[in-house]
Image (cartoon, helix red, strand yellow):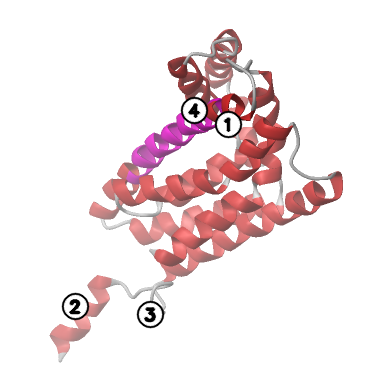
């Protein structure tokens, strides 16, 4: 579990440049109630709290799905399938974003973006929280990758914690954007973008190892069914 959380954290940090590109303009578009750095910091914390709350809800949903799969005895198969999908995403950047190509899903996303655009002018605390929550629902390949990792946790609360750690790791970049209008130079953002597929690949390998059940402590624990069979033979 600790190894998976570390992977979630690395995924969030490595994807910070992607987050700045996708969510940074939204953060900068929201007007600030009041003047000074305290007002900017307050709005940044509220927006990102809303986004993080939505990530936790996504983690609960995907973790519950993984829990159901685990109860059916298919958790290792799900872990291997998720690892293969993320490995494909690491090799072919952008493949996860193509999930949003369906007409019905595109309609839902269009309505979501319209609702977000109408909410951007709200500076009340509840308005900023809602803006962050809507932002967390926008299509994002990095969030898809994290959600896949959450589904492999076999427990809804572990899925929630996985998404919580992932989301928290993106906070420094987006709060810095809100506070200063920028985070780093083009070269730094370029290197972070290049590192993001590496982090997705690392998560894929972790999931594949978990599914393989190689008996490696904390990384690839043995299949409990096989362990019980061996114990029964002795």
Residue appearing at x 51%, y 48% in the figure: 166
Q: Quadrant of residue 76?
A: bottom left
The residue tagged 1 is 41
Most frequent secondary structure within the magenta stretch: helix
Q: Residue 53's spot in the image, x, y percent? A: 42, 33
**Are the residues at dot 1 and dot 4 in contact (C-beta closer than 8 Å)?**
no
Which SS class for mark 3? loop
Query: Which numbered mark, 1 or 3, is in the foreground of this view?
Result: 1
Task: Name the residue nearer the viewer: 221 or 37.
Answer: 37
How much space separates mark 2 and mark 3, taking CA atoms? 14 Å
Q: Secondary structure at mark 1?
A: helix
Mark carried by residue 215? 3
Q: Position of residue 38 (x, y in %)?
A: 58, 29
Q: For the magenta stretch, what is the residue range?
A: 43-63
Between the residue at mark 1 and the residue at mark 3, the CA separation in whole angstroms equals: 46 Å
Q: Which residue is mark 2?
A: 228
Quarter in which the N terminus is drawn: bottom left
Which residue was labeled with disc 4?
46
What number of labels is visible? 4
**Drawn side of residue 33 relative to residue 190, left or right:** left
Q: Say whether residue 94 is visible.
A: no
Q: Where is residue 71 drawn, in percent x and y?
A: 23, 53
Q: Nearer the viewer, mark 2 or mark 1?
A: 1
30 or 197, which lies in front?
A: 30
Instruction: Point out which mark residue 12 bears.
Output: none
| Residue 22 appearing in the image | yes
**Mark toward the viewer: 4 or 2:** 4
């Amino acid at each position: 579990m600790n190894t998976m959380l570390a992977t979630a954290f690395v995924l969030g940090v490595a994807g910070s440049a992607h987050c700045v590109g996708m969510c940074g303009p939204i953060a900068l578009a929201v007007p600030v109630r009041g003047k000074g750095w305290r007002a900017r910091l307050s709005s940044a914390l509220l927006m990102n709290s809303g986004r993080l709350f939505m990530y936790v809800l996504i983690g609960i949903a995907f973790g519950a799905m993984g829990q159901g799969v685990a109860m059916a005895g298919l958790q290792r198969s799900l872990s291997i399938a998720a690892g293969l999908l993320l490995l494909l995403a690491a090799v072919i950047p952008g493949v996860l974003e193509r999930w949003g190509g369906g007409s019905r899903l595109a309609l839902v996303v269009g309505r979501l973006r319209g609702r977000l655009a109408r909410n951007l002018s709200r500076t009340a605390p509840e308005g900023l929280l809602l803006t962050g929550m809507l932002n967390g629902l926008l299509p994002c390949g990095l969030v898809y990758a994290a959600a896949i990792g959450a589904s492999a946790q076999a427990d809804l609360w572990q899925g929630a914690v996985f998404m919580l750690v992932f989301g928290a790791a993106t906070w420094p970049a987006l709060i810095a954007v809100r506070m200063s209008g920028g985070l780093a130079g083009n070269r730094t953002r370029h290197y972070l973008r290049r590192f993001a597929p590496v982090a997705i690949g690392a998560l894929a390998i972790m999931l594949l190892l978990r599914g393989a059940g190689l008996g490696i402590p904390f990384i690839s624990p043995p299949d409990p069914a096989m362990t019980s069979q061996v114990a029964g033979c002795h």
